[in-house]
Amino acid sequence: MGYLAGTTIGFALTLIFIKLASVKGSPIVNNLIFTAVAATVQLAVFLYYRFKGTPLSITGEGLILSAIGGLFLGIYTVALFLTFSEIPVSKASPVIYAGAILLASCFGIFFLHEGISWQRFIGLALLVAGLFFVFNR
């Protein structure tokens, strides 16, 4: 549960600083600095675990999927900086993240065969309703 709380706080702070950086100069340049610092942190964590002796398994499929995911992460961060440079974070964030939850949930249900319960269905319907209210203010 500690990782979940830390991730939530870290994500909120990330969004705040992306918004602040996106309007203080070129969103493209600031995105590059942002992701370079993030890559440095990730490299430091990797090296920590490597020198600690923690086994780090590597598979070809894992590398390919990670590379594809990294491609989408790069596209996402550029688009996020550009979006936040033009649209208020209070309006863009709910649309982006609720939309992403809907898309990821549908992918999980239809392609990964994750079950759907009535509770999940109601939750997704509420997300759609929430998007409507946020965007049509």
Image: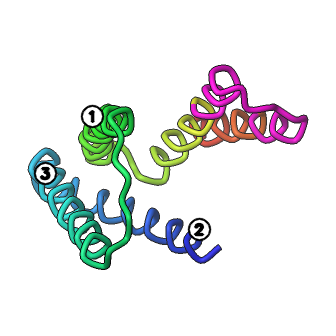
Q: Position of residue 103 (x, y in %)?
A: 58, 29
Kind of element beneath mark 2: helix
Residues at circles 3 and 1 in contact by the CB criterion of under 8 Å: no
Quadrant location of the N terminus in the rendered image: bottom right
Above-or-below relation of 116 to 6? above
> Mark 2 or mark 3: which comes first in sequence?
2
Kind of element beneath mark 1: helix
Eye-nearest disc, 3 or 1: 1
Residue at far top of view:
110
Query: Picture quarter containing residue 62?
Result: top left
* Amino acid beneath label 3: Leu
Image-based side of 90 in relation to 75, left or right: right
Q: CA distance from mark 3 to mark 1?
A: 14 Å
Q: What numbered label is drawn on residue 6?
A: none
Image-based side of 35 in relation to 57, left or right: left
Q: What numbered label is drawn on residue 4?
A: 2
> What residue is pinned by disc 1?
71
* Amino acid beneath label 1: Leu
> What residue is pinned by disc 3?
32
Instruction: Give the extent of the magenta segment.
Output: 104-124
The residue sitting at 36% across, 40% down in the picture is 59
> Mark 1 or mark 2: which comes first in sequence?
2
Eye-nearest disc, 2 or 3: 2
